[in-house]
Image: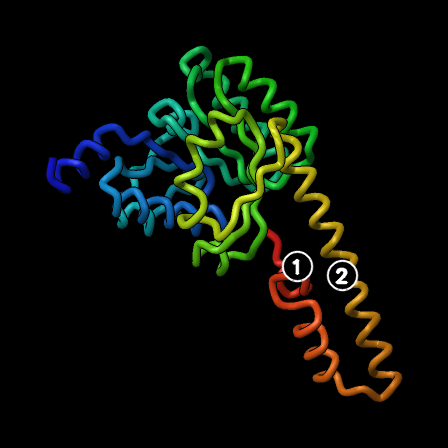
């Protein structure tokens, strides 16, 4: 079989992918997924957002808008979710749950940063209907997401984690952290990261205060932080960017 034939076969067997929630982070990641799907000849991304006009740019790339949130997992094998808070996520989860047994075999990947107990409740609710639920909070800012360079933590059933892997590293993320089989573990990792960020930010602020009182130039302290801690290896500039 020639390369064209192989590509067509791959496209025919590719799993369909959808996206719910097009805030600044969600849209940036969804755009990268659609670009990837288009480049590989896979089915176009289905998407939904409360304000559907926010998906205009995604639609111009070939994405397909859905009328209702539940339409996305109804039509797609894999659905990413990127929402603002626990209340909104719970509302959307209840909407998805109305699909009942038709959710069996579907994979739901939730990138929303919520309380671990919220993840547990929703995972239990949707897993009971046969879906595989993955907690997948991300680390990074909107520009980082647009560049496909966020860090993502994932936790959930192993078969589903392996299935979504091709859509993570190199598409929406620079790196993937596997936190375990319980979706809530990924959110616990995100909470731990936020604690580290707060602690490091405080320590850097205290270091600047000490430097100022001691007559040390701020530029020297900044060089120390960069060269001793290393950008991307603990510097608050990197760790402090949250979704």
Instruction: Look at mark 2 in the image and give the residue it sits on.
Output: 200
Does residue 18 appear anywhere in the picture?
A: yes
Using residue 122 as the reference point, say whether residue 221 is left or right of it: right
Residue visible at 49% across and 60% down?
A: 143
Gap in angstroms between the C-alphas marked 2 and 1: 9 Å
**What is the residue that sits farthest to the top in this orientation?**
101
Residue visible at 53% across and 35% down?
A: 110
Which residue is at the front of the view, 143 or 168?
Answer: 168
SS for tag 1? loop
**2 and 1 marks in contact (CB < 8 Å):** yes
> Which label's residue is closer to the chain start, 2 or 1?
2
Question: For the residues carrying marks 2 and 1, which lies nearer the camera in this image?
Answer: 2
Using residue 156 as the reference point, say whether residue 69 is left or right of it: left
Task: For label 1, count other residues whose C-alpha is less than 10 Å away and answer few (under 14), some (14-19) or many (20+).
Answer: some
Instruction: Look at mark 1 in the image and give the residue it sits on.
Output: 240
SS for tag 2? helix
Does residue 24 appear anywhere in the picture?
A: no
């Amino acid at each position: 079989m020639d390369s064209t034939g192989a590509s067509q076969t791959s496209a025919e067997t590719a799993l369909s992918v959808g996206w719910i929630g097009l805030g600044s982070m969600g849209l940036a990641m969804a755009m990268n997924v659609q670009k990837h799907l288009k480049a590989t000849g896979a089915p176009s991304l289905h998407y939904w957002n409360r304000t559907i006009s926010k998906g205009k740019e995604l639609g111009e790339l070939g994405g397909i808008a859905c009328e209702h949130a539940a339409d996305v997992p109804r039509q797609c094998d894999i659905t990413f979710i990127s929402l603002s808070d626990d209340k909104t996520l719970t509302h959307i989860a209840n909407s998805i749950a109305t699909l009942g047994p038709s959710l069996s075999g579907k994979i739901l990947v939730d990138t929303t940063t919520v309380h671990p107990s919220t993840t547990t409740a929703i995972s239990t609710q949707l897993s009971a209907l046969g879906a595989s639920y993955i907690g997948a909070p991300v680390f990074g800012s909107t520009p980082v997401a647009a560049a496909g360079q966020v860090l993502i933590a994932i936790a959930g059933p192993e078969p589903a984690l392996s299935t979504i892997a091709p859509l993570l590293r190199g598409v929406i993320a620079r790196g993937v952290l596997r936190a375990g089989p319980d979706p809530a573990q990924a959110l616990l990792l995100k909470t731990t990261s936020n604690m580290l960020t707060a602690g490091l930010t405080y320590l850097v602020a205290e270091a600047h205060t000490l430097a100022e009182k001691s007559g040390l130039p701020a530029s020297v302290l900044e060089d120390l932080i960069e060269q001793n801690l290393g950008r991307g290896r603990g510097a608050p500039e990197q760790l402090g960017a949250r979704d």
